[in-house]
Amino acid sequence: MDQKFNYGGQAVLEGVMMRGSRNMAVAVRAPNGEIVIHEQPITSSLYNGFWSKVPFVRGLGMLWDSLGLGMRALTFSADIAVGDEAEFSGPMAWGTIAVSMLLAVGLFFITPRLAADGIQAGVRLIGVDSALAGNLIEGVVRLVIVVGYIWLVGRIPDIQRVFAYHGAEHKTINAYEDNAALTPEVVARYSTEHPRCGTGFLLIVVFISVLVFSLLGDPPWYIRYPSRIVLIPVIAGISYEYMRFMARNLQNPIVRWLVRPQLALQHLTTRQPSADMLEISITALQRVLATEDLPVAVADIAPVEAR
């Protein structure tokens, strides 16, 4: 099977989004039990053009475009999942997303530095002053916040369903990469872990941020804090290349050992999906494969309403 095309996925509310090089498809379970499909072509040169081949730059571009696709998929799924109760779209949706991103930057990048500065101030009182130690403390705090946040939100029942759809997405892609039949019975046998998962990417970002920020040493606060925001694209680009390299070299025993923490963290963001969740994920992937002119294994699924 030729798998040399860009593809990936994302869990959404009561559904899964899959994207390829040419098309994006979102499959969502409506309140009446039907599977509702939304498809749109992918025309961005970030996936197929010049920039998709430039190391480090391509990672930032892909992540930015994927963010846009993911947000559109999320708003569509929210509108379907709530039925006629409300509509999560337009200014309300994008306003919520913008505020969420600002809060995320503050929580995951600024707060760890504030905590590290506080701890460093105490350490200096006993005569120990090290820029490297400060950056290591910042990295540890960032890791604790990331893991703690994921664990906490994972206690919410609605998020647990999203995590189950995340598991369905991983199982479906793993089955496809193994050239297996895309049926719920077959896909259910596969793992909920995948080396190219966004959860693993977060862990990579934490470690890469320690390396990047350590290069700055211990600059004044008016450089230290803005750098945590300005250097996010740099960290993201390096992290993307690292994850890409690891995913392409899993046959190497050292690489397999290095990706273990990424796979372990995914246990917090995936759950074992039900058969109807696997139907959703399979449906989304089948729609994408059809646009890539690749073989599609047909599953026995519920009626589909296309939108």
Image: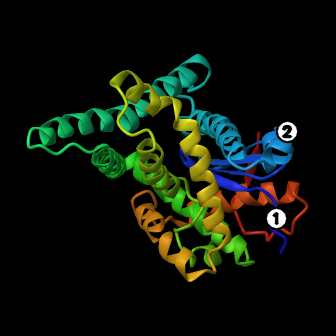
Name the front one of labels 1 and 2: 1
Tell me which residue sits at (85%, 47%) in the image. Answer: 48
Q: Secondary structure at mark 2?
A: loop
Is 188 drawn above or below residue 236 in the view shown?
below
Tag 2: Cα neighbours inside 10 Å, few (<14), some, or many (≥20)?
Answer: few
Q: Are marks 1 and 2 in contact (CB under 8 Å)?
A: no
Quadrant location of the C terminus in the rendered image = top right
Residue furthest to the right: 293
Residue 151 in the figure: left or right of residue 277: left
Tell me which residue sits at (50%, 64%) in the image. Answer: 273
- Give the spatial CA distance, label 1 vs label 2: 18 Å
Residue 22 in the figure: left or right of residue 269: right
Name which residue type carries label 1: Lys
Q: Nearer the viewer, residue 240 or 118?
A: 118
Tag 1: Cα neighbours inside 10 Å, few (<14), some, or many (≥20)?
Answer: few
Q: Secondary structure at mark 1?
A: loop
Is 111 drawn above or below residue 51 in the view shown?
above
Quadrant location of the N terminus in the rendered image = bottom right
Tell me which residue sits at (78%, 53%) in the image. Answer: 20
The residue under label 2 is 43
The residue under label 1 is 4
